Amino acid sequence: MKLDERKFRILQAIIDDYITTAMPVGSRTISRKQGMGLSSATIRNEMSDLEELGYLASPHTSAGRIPSYRAYRLYVDQIMRVGALPTSEYATLRKLFARRMGQMEDVLTSATQALSEMTDYTSVMIAPQMRTIKRVQLVPLTDTTALMVTVTEQGVHKESVIHIPQGVTVEHLYTMGNLLTEKIAGRDASELPAVMQEFYSEMAGQRELFGQLMDSLQRQMEPNAHSVHVAGAARMLSHPEYSDVERAKSLLSTLETQDKLARLLMQRNGLEFSVAIGPELSEAGMQDCSLVTVSYRVGSGVGTMGVIGPTRMHYGRVISVLEAMKKVMNEALLPQKGSGERKEENNEE
Amino acid sequence: MKLDERKFRILQAIIDDYITTAMPVGSRTISRKQGMGLSSATIRNEMSDLEELGYLASPHTSAGRIPSYRAYRLYVDQIMRVGALPTSEYATLRKLFARRMGQMEDVLTSATQALSEMTDYTSVMIAPQMRTIKRVQLVPLTDTTALMVTVTEQGVHKESVIHIPQGVTVEHLYTMGNLLTEKIAGRDASELPAVMQEFYSEMAGQRELFGQLMDSLQRQMEPNAHSVHVAGAARMLSHPEYSDVERAKSLLSTLETQDKLARLLMQRNGLEFSVAIGPELSEAGMQDCSLVTVSYRVGSGVGTMGVIGPTRMHYGRVISVLEAMKKVMNEALLPQKGSGERKEENNEE
DNA sequence: TGTTAGCACTCTCGATCGTTGAGTGCTAAC
DNA sequence: GTTAGCACTCAACGATCGAGAGTGCTAACA
């Protein structure tokens, strides 16, 4: 048996219906659909075939059919069609960023919230992962600690506290910072070990401080649990698949553990676009979820954002929102590079 | 009618029972309790009185009684007795911090998680609010932006990005930072406006940059939405009062909005100890919750942590955990001030 | 006078059991 | 190949009922 044109169209109708209603779809519902032109009996036969092919499942004998994992996979890969976001919404999105000019983290937080609001699902985001460092600066904090600030091309920065061994003066720190900057500026993260090796030989005796710097740098380069943003986890409770409290709890617990989410996103970091459906996600409580991600770029840094919803997700809508957000964020974050001022040019409303 | 000694004892027994079982308490349950020595009939009469006094309510005729808001208030104020945390648990808590030495934010995150795990409720925490600034440093990021790092006595630091007007050189920034440091070092947050006024006159013409600095400083002094840590929100779903999905959703949504939580904690910041019960909390979905908070101190900075659970909360346990955490955190965070090294002294396993 | 045994009464909870309705699968006619 | 028709299945709903927990009241008791 083959999945011919007609079966394909029927499957599409079933998935579309199920996505909006969350109720098992019966043959009559489909046959009544505009442009279908087939009796319910015919649809029944086809549905029976589709079940045999593994695209549909029936919760029980007299309850209609629901799409299986395989159906969603097909839907995402071949059936669904993604439109651009309505211009009005796109405009709203742009406005959201127009007046923003705070820290990167602030931008990510509000972007994540916007994603969740616009899709009514949960959204997650990781900050752009640094690739090339532009400058390293050591700022003394107390007698025994200093702040190491690394600045990337685009002005993205990260900080971490390092411990200063006794005997290191403030002047020492400044020159150290300058030296580090000299060595490291413009080099890629992958070159880090080599650069550090080189630097090491010049740091006569300062083994402890060197170790601290090395550690911090490496930590800053790798995915940071702190940079995972989550918004709208509670929205999952609106969807009928989570009316069961046990399920909801299991999922929400996972959505709370930042390192699980970080791993999930890091795996997809750099991927232009990805969709993981139900059983493809192994995290606890996520078997009935899908995760759609896109990566965004800030200079040489690449971050990833995603939307988590039930497998019965409005994939088309979600994808167009994600694409729009990516575009807007790129525009909003790039100008930091230098050149022009970013004051409001045309007064709105 | 008065709340005599016996009524008091009976009320205590009822609350204790209800806190652990979450089920309406009947007269027989109480009369069978060790050391009560009264028949169920007597208890019934007393319970009837307690209801009239407003301490108890009955969900329906034949369902036993549940404590009212008033009962919890009395319980917290007069009945409950708080013990110290078992030494074994206290030791575990200390170990948690023993090896920590990262950024303040990391410490807060793990402390918040520990609070939630130990109580099985949701926990929230705000970072210590700065009072006196020790140093201000301006770190150039890109051509048009710089990072303003403020350092407090204890090495707590905060950063924010500021916009640099054209024509300001890097050297300019450094001297500006030094000047600001000179003016502001050791002064209290409340003096900020006065200090800035003074500084203003010396900043000939640099109105825009001045404005930026002023804004950032003020933003850093005020409660920062980003510094709210939440852990274990999903645990709320374990408690029977949230088996209703609608309720759960409403509560979890509130627990997700950081600024609501920030406000809640800031109101209590500096308070040694506070308990807000049910109707005293006006946030959406929190009418059946209680919030217990304690403040902790890092040098001159004061932060607040709290535990959110159902009004039927194990107040005694929660308070002893919070007190222990406060103590441990004070110990763990203070040494940063200067003096001694903080390498592991005794190697564990 | 306070305490308690006894009893009628109330109300929820859970189980049982038709009934209803949506939906299927099969068959036979078109 | 398509469709009308029909018997069949099964969850969902509602009504009914008994059990059990708990109360309030009364009358007896110390």
Image (tube, coloured by chain):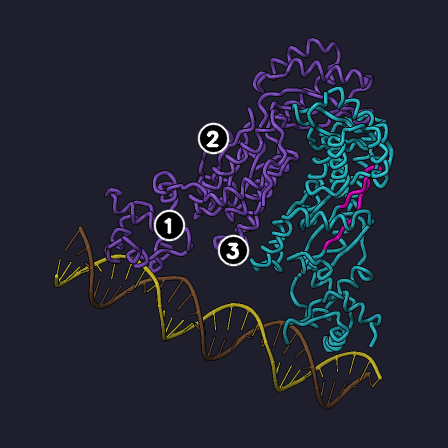
Chain colours: A purple, B cyan, C yellow, D brown
Which quadrant holds the N terminus of chain A? top left
**Would you call the spot at circle 2 few (<14 residues within 10 Å), some (14-19), or many (20 or more)?**
some
Instruction: Please tell me whether residue A322 is drawn above or below residue A222 in the rendered image.
Output: below
Label 3 and label 2: CA atoms lie apart by 34 Å
Membership of B94 in magenta stretch:
no
Mark 1: which secondary structure? helix
For marks 1 and 3, the one nearer the N-term is 1
At 24% from the left and 54% from the top, the residue drawn is: A37
Query: Which segment is the magenta one?
Result: B291-304
Q: Position of residue A213 (x, y in %)?
A: 70, 20
Foreground of the two, B95 or A158? A158
At 37% from the left and 49% from the top, the residue drawn is: A15
At 58% from the left and 55% from the top, the residue drawn is: B249
Confirm whether residue B185 shows in the render: yes
Q: Are marks 3 and 2 in contact (CB under 8 Å)?
A: no
Instruction: Please tell me whether residue B28 is drawn above or below residue A87 in the rendered image.
Output: below
- The amino acid marked with disc number 2 is Leu
Label 1 and label 3: CA atoms lie apart by 24 Å
Foreground of the two, A275 or D15? A275
Q: Quadrant of residue B277?
A: bottom right
**Residue that mark 3 sits on:** A244
Query: Can you tell which mark lies on residue A271?
Result: 2
- The amino acid marked with disc number 3 is Asp
Chain to which the residue tagged by mark 2 belongs: A
Chain to which the residue tagged by mark 1 belongs: A
For marks 2 and 1, the one nearer the N-term is 1
From the viewer's perspective, is A320 left or right of A249? left
- The amino acid marked with disc number 1 is Asp
Membership of B303 in magenta stretch:
yes
From the viewer's perspective, is B1 left or right of B314? right
Q: Quadrant of residue B161?
A: top right
**Residue that mark 1 sits on:** A16
